[in-house]
Image (cartoon, helix red, strand yellow):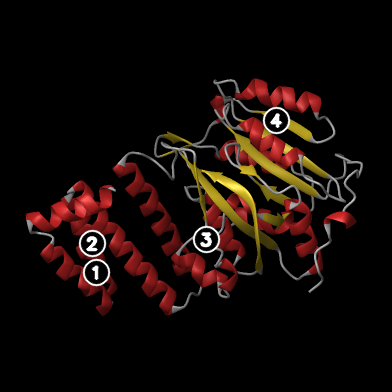
Amino acid sequence: MKTQKTEEEIKVNFKNDITNPLVSICCVTYNHCEYISQTLEGFLMQKTNFSYEICLGEDGSMDGTKEICQKYAEKNLDRIRLFQRSREDVIFIDNKPTGKFNFNETLKECKGKYIAICEGDDYWTDPYKLQKQIDFLEDNKYDMVHTNFSSLKNGIITNKPNNVGSIKDVKNQLLIKNFIGNLTVCVKKDVLLDAYANISSNYLSVDLAIAMQISQKSKIGYLKDNTAMYRISDNTASNSTSLYSQFFFIKSAFQMKNDFINKYQYSQTAINKLNHRWCRVLFKYYIKLGDSAIKFELNKFIQDRKQKSLWIYKFILLISRLDLTRKMLKKLWSN
């Protein structure tokens, strides 16, 4: 493996050519007026010895995001290409608006050999993020690379344990848990487009589905550098304040993973671990919501899988009939 270029070796004053970029940054934004400036500054501060473009898809925001994007695009014609969408084109899933149309169309506009992804409420913190990732991809037989990142919620920053580098079997581990921060991904354009074309358009966890699809045929690398900040906001698809919305989102991801199991080969160990995770989710939301339909679903899931290790949840359900036990668990999961 070749060593990464030092900061001194990178031509900081490289003249950018937006007509022939090596990398396209794909950024979609909607009602991110409080955050989009920080996101764009994170792109513009990148120091590289190659050309890159910022493909900015604005989805008809009504909070001032559109105007901020326009100002940045006007001032940075050599970097930013702004695409303004209409809310009339929004794609709905289960009667809820999504950003799929904006992402689809913005992705089509990307001209680079590589695509880096970051949504309009997250941001990059390392000015050499792109350079490090492109050096890695150009020097090694990998099609995609991601990095470590931190999370920001209510003004509190949480650093993730830097143990992803020890994961060797990326394909099977992604089935169990998503450890890839989409805001840190840099991937070959042809690989991304091929993966995107082969996943269902109804998946809510599009970033995970893409990573799982890519892992079927490609090597995915990891850099330990902390390069970005993931902003956790309330009432998003993955961080809803509604318990039923939370459950629906997690359930849709589990159903997606089962589609992958039916389509591709996975280790039985990974499948068994996924089954345990789903049983824990079902039990947790049964306790939190007191919904007998979820209890029925858990019982049926255990019965259908015929996996002996899952029968422990039958015993746990039995114990949970006690009022004191339910109250203790509810209090535990409310914190």
Name the N-terminal-most of marks 4 and 2.
4
Q: Nearer the viewer, mark 1 or mark 3?
A: 3
* x then y, percent, for residue 299: 20, 64
What distance separates the C-alpha of mark 2 from that of mark 3? 26 Å
Q: Are marks 3 and 4 in contact (CB under 8 Å)?
A: no
Name the N-terminal-most of marks 3 and 4.
4
**Which residue lies at the image location 59% right of the left edge and 41% below the top edge?**
122
**Which residue lies at the image location 39% right of the left edge and 58% below the top edge?**
255
**Quadrant where the image shows the N terminus:** bottom right
Circle 4 crowding by C-alpha within 10 Å: few under 14, some 14–19, many from 20: some
* x then y, percent, for residue 54: 74, 39
Q: Which residue is mark 3?
A: 179
Circle 1 crowding by C-alpha within 10 Å: few under 14, some 14–19, many from 20: many
Circle 2 crowding by C-alpha within 10 Å: few under 14, some 14–19, many from 20: many
**Which residue lies at the image location 84% right of the left edge and 61% below the top edge?**
5
Name the N-terminal-most of marks 4 and 1.
4
- Give me the disc on residue 302: 1
* x then y, percent, for residue 301: 26, 65
- Report the side of 29 relative to 46 (left or right): left
Residue type at mark 4? Phe
Residue type at mark 1? Ile
- The answer to whether one can see residue 306 in this image is no
Q: Are marks 2 and 1 in contact (CB under 8 Å)?
A: yes
Compared with 135, 19 (above or below) is above
Residue type at mark 3? Phe
Q: Which residue is mark 4?
A: 83
Front-lying residue, 79 or 109: 79
What distance separates the C-alpha of mark 3 from that of mark 4? 30 Å
- Report the side of 33 relative to 239 (left or right): right
